[in-house]
Image (cartoon, coloured by chain):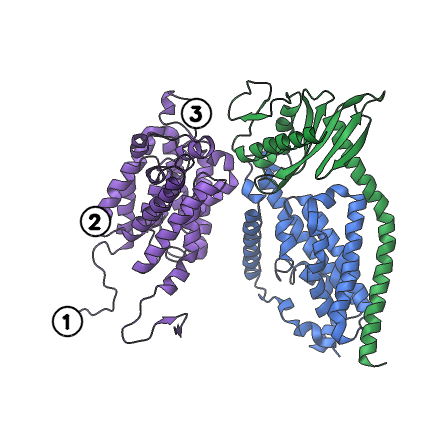
Chain colours: A purple, B green, C blue
């Protein structure tokens, strides 16, 4: 009788990367379909061009680097999809494709491919687009505009809050009947699959919990200080890309901390950044930058939250801690 | 000659020679630089207050404005130097008002460091032309994604509300200061 | 080393600055003006020319007086010489080309601290004769001009969305912003390294090894 002996960590369910990527893609499908229903053909075009460009770029880079194609693990398609979900539905398709090319080529493959990237590739692509095409990135469409219900140009709930001090009804935010990015409008459709995955252990619950928690606490604090000037915590939680970012982007395994303690720090700090950017900067939304900034801190967080090995003194940067 | 003296002598000589060269260069360049500055200022003043042939600069604390006079010595208006913080840095503008201060006669942006392609559009003709003929009382207002409906309104640049708002606020504030100082 | 050094012709000394030891692409020196002012072809070109002027003049002067300067005060002396020429260039631009001077802003006075200039004075001009130093500085300056002009042109084309007015497309605003400078420079260096590897040349950046230039020291 022979035993298979391996060192830790031992994998349990959902161990393989392709399976994991596919499950997350499936989890994003409800929000994707809702986005297409809400925003019509333009949204579908943005999603398709982004996904296809992401996969083709990965293939092309694989060819240039002369390595086996890695597109079958589904991570490129997921990056393309995540990017598309954070874009405005009326974005020209070639700009979405360009963002996907940048996300994969510069955000991921230049670092060495999946597992080596420091920043979330989809958000790198989005940051590039936000800097390259600021007008298109902030031109939104009202839901159902393709049926001719309302004019094309429409402000997002966060922009309305920031520039005109107008609030939006919660039920609209919850079910997604507002203008915004393709995939960020409905908190419900993002939350349900995520809850299922957290239950299954696929998505770590600590990051979303600390992220959303710190947004709610800090947002609530400001609301208590001056309710007329600052929006209440529920609005913070439901509006903008917070749900999408907290549930599907901040939780990216590659670019988030490894230790449970680190995850709490990561999420909480990102939440603080979101509130600070939303309330005190020139931008209406801060989820993208909050996650990108915290991505940069992940190695440091990992270093400081490393558990002590039993029987050995606590070490940091290879030296014992006094 | 010992080391120390040599060091002192060499550095002093180099310093003296370069100082001499620079003073010559400065004497040559200074009048040209002055002419350039005056030319730039002339162009700005003449553009924002049409019909001006000469002007008088008046500086009052941190406020600078130019009383403008036409061909026959009549007052054509005032050009006011407006300065304040924009989205990324200081915005410097020249704003013209007519003699009885009923409307603006023009505006140009002298210096700005707003986002290229977005906030930087405040320096483009399409935006600055809106100030020509604008009613100067009550203070300027801006509207977004709509045509101005009142005489004192301008349309903000799409996607660059902050820069547009900054321009309006700076002008309103400076013009108010000027009225108090006048 | 010393023998081969003496034999190096003027043409080689000139060409090394353009390609093998290009200050921007190979030595990664003078990054501040490289990244900050290259928003258009004309800005890149004029910045490159102003720097070349200072570089050539200061290298020649430093080489001429190199035997008079005591070792202990050499850096101070070099800086005074460099600062003199920078101020001259600044005054000249302000007087004759006010528009360019305005576009380049504080980066003309900042040529003083451009490490290419002090670097060439220290590793080359202070150890070689004036003719050679002149050619070396001219080569380095040309390399700098080429690099800045290329960067400026690429950024202008994408950032204004117009290929010399022939083809027009949606401008990529990021290319005018600082981020675009980093992206363009990084991709250009990557491309040049790739080409260098392809042509089978050694991938050494000789400027990092000042041994080469110390042949005539003392």
Labels 2 and 1: the sequence-earlier one:
1
- Do we see residue B125 in this rendering? yes
According to the picture, the residue beneath numbered tag 3 turns out to be A152
Provide residue A146's location: percent of width, then percent of height: 38, 24
Q: Is residue C210 above or below residue C52?
A: below
According to the picture, the residue beneath numbered tag 2 turns out to be A199
Label 3 sits on a secondary structure element that is: loop
According to the picture, the residue beneath numbered tag 1 turns out to be A2
Residue furthest left in the image: A1
Provide residue A304's location: percent of width, then percent of height: 38, 64
Is circle 3 on the same chain as circle 2?
yes
Q: Is residue B158 above or below residue A284?
A: above
Provide residue C211's location: percent of width, then percent of height: 66, 74
The span from disc 2 to disc 1 (Cα, nearest Å) is 35 Å
Label 2 sits on a secondary structure element that is: helix
Q: Is residue C216 above or below residue B131?
A: below
Labels 3 and 1: the sequence-earlier one:
1
Assess whether mark 2 and mark 3 are in contact (beta carbons under 8 angstroms): no
């Amino acid at each position: 009788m022979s035993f298979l002996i391996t060192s830790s960590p031992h994998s349990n369910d959902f161990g393989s990367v392709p399976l994991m990527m596919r499950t997350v893609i499936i989890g994003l499908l409800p929000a994707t379909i809702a986005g297409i229903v809400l925003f019509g053909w333009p949204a579908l075009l943005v999603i398709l061009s982004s996904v296809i460009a992401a996969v083709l770029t990965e293939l092309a880079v694989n060819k240039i680097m002369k390595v086996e194609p890695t597109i079958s693990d589904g991570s490129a398609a997921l990056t393309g999809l995540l990017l598309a979900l954070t874009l405005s539905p009326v974005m020209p398709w070639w700009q979405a494709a360009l963002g996907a090319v940048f996300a994969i080529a510069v955000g991921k493959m230049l670092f060495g491919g999946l597992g080596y990237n420091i920043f979330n590739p989809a958000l790198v692509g989005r940051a590039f687009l936000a800097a390259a095409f600021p007008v298109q990135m902030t031109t939104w469409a009202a839901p159902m505009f393709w049926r001719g219900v309302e004019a094309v140009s429409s402000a997002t709930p966060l922009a309305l809050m920031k520039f005109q001090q107008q609030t939006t009804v919660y039920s609209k935010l919850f079910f997604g009947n507002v203008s915004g990015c393709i995939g960020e409008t409905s908190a419900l459709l993002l939350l349900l699959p995520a809850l299922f995955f957290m239950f299954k252990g696929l998505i770590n619950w600590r990051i979303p919990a600390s992220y959303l928690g710190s947004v709610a606490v800090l947002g609530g604090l400001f609301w208590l200080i001056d309710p007329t000037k600052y929006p209440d915590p529920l609005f913070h939680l439901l509006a903008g890309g917070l749900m999408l970012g907290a549930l599907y982007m901040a939780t990216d395994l590659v670019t988030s901390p490894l230790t449970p303690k680190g995850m709490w720090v990561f999420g909480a700090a990102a939440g603080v950044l979101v509130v600070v950017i939303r309330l005190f900067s020139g931008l209406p939304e801060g989820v993208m930058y909050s996650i990108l900034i915290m991505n940069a801190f992940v190695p440091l967080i990992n270093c400081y939250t490393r558990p002590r090995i039993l029987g050995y003194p606590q070490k940091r940067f290879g030296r014992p801690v006094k | 000659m010992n080391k120390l003296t040599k060091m002192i002598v060499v550095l002093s000589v180099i310093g003296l020679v370069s100082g001499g060269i620079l003073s010559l260069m400065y004497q040559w360049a200074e009048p040209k630089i002055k002419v350039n500055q005056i030319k730039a200022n002339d162009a700005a003043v003449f553009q924002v207050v049409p019909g001006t042939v000469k002007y008088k600069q008046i500086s009052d604390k941190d406020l600078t404005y130019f009383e403008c006079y036409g061909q026959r010595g009549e007052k054509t208006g005032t050009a006011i130097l407006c300065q304040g913080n924009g989205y990324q840095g200081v915005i410097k503008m020249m704003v013209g008002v007519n003699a009885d201060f009923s409307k603006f006669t023009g505006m140009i942006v002298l210096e700005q460091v707003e986002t290229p392609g977005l906030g930087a559009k405040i320096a483009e003709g399409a935006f600055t032309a809106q100030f020509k003929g604008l009613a100067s009382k009550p203070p300027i207002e801006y509207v977004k994604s709509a045509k101005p409906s009142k005489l004192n309104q301008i349309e903000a640049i799409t996607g660059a509300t902050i820069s547009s708002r900054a321009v309006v606020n700076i002008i309103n504030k400076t013009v108010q200061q000027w009225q108090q100082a006048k | 080393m010393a023998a081969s050094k003496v034999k190096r012709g003027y043409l080689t000394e000139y060409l090394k600055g353009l390609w093998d030891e290009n200050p921007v692409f190979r030595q990664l020196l003078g990054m501040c003006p490289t990244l900050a002012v290259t928003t258009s072809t004309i800005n890149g070109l004029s910045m490159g020319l102003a720097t070349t002027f200072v570089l050539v003049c200061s290298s020649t002067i430093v080489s001429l007086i190199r035997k008079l300067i005591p070792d202990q005060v050499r850096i101070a002396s070099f800086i005074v010489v460099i600062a003199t020429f920078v101020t001259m260039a600044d005054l000249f631009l302000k007087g004759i080309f006010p528009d360019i001077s305005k576009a380049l802003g504080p980066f003309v006075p900042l040529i003083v601290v451009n490490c290419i200039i002090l670097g060439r004075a220290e590793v080359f001009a202070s150890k070689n004769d004036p003719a050679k130093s002149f050619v070396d500085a001219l080569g380095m300056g040309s390399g700098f001009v080429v690099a800045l002009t290329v960067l400026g042109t690429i950024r202008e084309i994408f950032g204004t969305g117009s290929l010399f007015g022939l083809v027009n497309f949606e401008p990529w605003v990021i290319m005018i912003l600082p981020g675009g400078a980093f992206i363009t420079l990084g991709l250009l260096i990557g491309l040049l390294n790739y080409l260098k590897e392809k042509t089978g040349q050694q991938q050494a950046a000789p400027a990092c090894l000042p041994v080469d230039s110390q042949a005539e020291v003392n």
